[in-house]
Amino acid sequence: MAPWLSLRFGLAKLLIGWATKRYIVPKQPLEQLDIDTSKPICYVLRTRSYSALATLEIAAKENKLPFNANREASETPNYLFLGKPHNWLSLNGELPEEEEQLTNCLNAVKDGQVPDVQIVPVAIYWGRNPGKERSLFKLLFADQENIGALRRLLVVLANGRHTFVRFSRPISLKQWLDGVEQAQDQRKLVRTLKHHFHYQRQAAFGPGGVNTNEIARQILSTDAVKQAISAEAKKKKISQGKAKHKAKKMVLEIASTPSFAVLRFFSLFLSWLWNKLYDGVECFQTERLREVAKENQVIYVPCHRSHMDYLLLSYVLYHEGLMPPYIAAGINLDFWPIGSVLRRSGAFFIRRSFRNDRLYQAVFSEYMNCLAKRGLAIEYFIEGGRSRTGKLLSPKTGMISMTLSNYIQDKKKPIVFVPVYIGYDRVMEVSTYHKELFGKEKKKESMFQLLRSRRALSQSFGKVNVNFGEPLFLDEQLDTLAEGWRENKDERPSWLKPVVSTLSLRLCESINAAAAPSTVSLVSSILLTTPRLSIDEKRMSRLLSGLLNMLETVPYSQDLVYGAMSAPQHIEKAIEVNLIERQELEGGNILRLANITPSLLTYYSNNILHLFALPSLIASHFVRNTTVAAPALRENMRKLYPFVKRELFLPHNEHQAETYTDELLAWYEKTGWLKHDEGHFSCTDQHTAMLVKHMAGFSEALLSAWAIPLCILVFSKDPGSRGQVISLAAKIAKQLEILYGFSSPDKFDKSMFQQFIDVYLTDHEQQDVDSAAALLDLLFSLLPQAIENQLMEVAMDSIGPANQELVVS
């Protein structure tokens, strides 16, 4: 490097060291990107910039990556620039001969001077503010690819505290040369790298911001909205002008107005808030997300456990170097001052119900279409609202249906759905959910509620895991579910509704497949299988070790993450977050529930019930039986699987479920919990029998809930309609709770009865008493005798009067 360039580079390093705060993506590039430091590395920057080069050197050395600013010191250059910035007010000299450097690099590999060179693209973003499409700020301060030295200085000074350095996975030049013709190798490599930077920038920035009034003009000018305005004017007997004004007010009620200043504020505020509330936020499988975000419109579909979800995912994506999404939020959150803040951080608001409002339907659909045309990332919650039970709720298909309808009418940028599992050690609102499930009316969100929630700042809520599941590409899904969809001309084809239903279920299954079981959920699940919510510490440790070993040996899915904590570490963590306490006794330590309402355990247990449902159903066969024939056990599992799949959104088809069952049986045998002898399974000894009974307890409430509507179908002369069966089942469940403390009400959520009846009626007639009786006998054989007696007693007492009421009505 020439002396004057060395001086300039040195000054740039001083400026960068003083003026910037660097966010490295990914956080550990050396390990996460599989960079081999024993091979030569050549970093590639999009345009020549000594401030970018200085940032690269600092970031590389901070992350133990080799870097040498003197390119003449080695056989292959340590860095390259792909292009030259514009010269508007620029003090740049001539661009060095980068093509010659790249040629030397390629020739060194071809001639065998070096075995290989790793090309590592590095993108550096200053502030990541896309700016408005037409604004003075964008002209002067927004980061753009091709700007000169003076403008770069202004950008660094304005946005340097939010500098993102994005390392990409290395490209092996040796492998690259094996796959291209020699005459094209350099040009094709440059073209590939330029495309890489282009798509990566799109994923990080998205398109420029658009004025809300401009969006309103576009929406109001569409044919669908014009027709809806005319229909509204005719229906309400008002003028076209008033109907149009009403439509514009709807747009302004819905529309998000993202502000980069608010996003930057949230980045700082949420960093403080997470550190105050949680022990950390850990993200998994973000690299696959960055890949799909390059060339697709991403629709994030997370589970919904807390109001924190709105903030958390945007925060995570921002710090992973990706564009924060536009978030569909309930209109109940649009209150002062939170509504305005959420709107400026990317939220757009949706009414809870608008089935009979044609004008609102048209306006909202066109707003979604506007976001899609710009390729903007979107986030919506497929459950429709927060889960009060801890389980994934049945999907609400409205947003999926609208997404598909718009896409098949106007095929724009390809769409990819990204399921997201958000797992909290402890959920801030869980005590409120508990009260609502016991019948207390849900309080409307307000400023007063927000002020009351400040008390939570003095508590610890453990850790948060965010896991990005397997992406679902919409084109691929439509190819398998709706043959010939590309030639579709209808606005709502006949295949749309079943495709939406199937896709919604697949998304729920994918969310659950990406589960991240926490300490609290694991320990809560085990405590609930004990009579007095207390357990010997050695047994707790053995059960935890068994669960962790099962997840590792027979994984529920490839997307599952569960950390590397051992059973003793989980126990210590549960004590630390005040879930349990240890009582030291001479005969051994006892772990018991700390100062927490016992029924709250059910919420956390439900978070991971789907992971252990099938292992628990296997164990349930040994609640009353010492020995079970292997064919009978497998047949019972086959009969029960459709019900558990629908209730807990299990990802396996029937054949996969049979294979998974065999793998679980092999695990039980290998660990010594069960033994297999002459076609029969049995418990190995009394100690393992106790462990197996604990496992059976995981599914006890599920089996009990299914038995209630079957009792009605079997023992009622006239069970009535589907709705009447479900209503009576809910009443029986409530009586069981009052009489026997049978369970917390969230384990007998009404939707459980609805889903069970729906699955049952797909293969059976409601009047088929024999089939219902056979299934009821199977369920009772898997439950303790005491629970069967209680269920039968309450059900028989309720059925007589209920039948008389049904006959009269």
Image: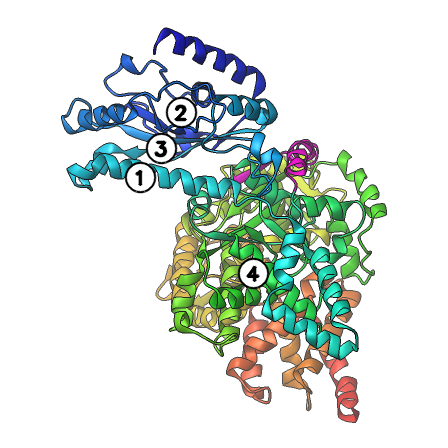
Amino acid type, callout 4: Asn
Pick whichever of labels 2 and 1 is earlier in the sequence. Answer: 2
Pick whichever of labels 1 and 4 is earlier in the sequence. Answer: 1
Pick whichever of labels 4 and 3 is earlier in the sequence. Answer: 3
The mark found on residue 191 in the picture is 1
- Figure quadrant of residue 356: bottom right
User: The C terminus appears in which quarter of the rendering?
Assistant: bottom right
The residue beneath circle 3 is 34
Residue 635, how many percent across, how many down? 43, 72
Pick whichever of labels 2 and 4 is earlier in the sequence. Answer: 2
Q: Nearer the viewer, mark 1 or mark 3?
A: 1
Residue 630 can be seen, yes or no: no
Q: Secondary structure at mark 2?
A: loop
Residue 537 can be seen, yes or no: yes
| Depicted 139 relative to depicted 752: above or below | above
Asked if the magenta segment contains residue 129, the reply would be no
Residue 390, how many percent across, how many down? 65, 55
The residue beneath circle 2 is 48
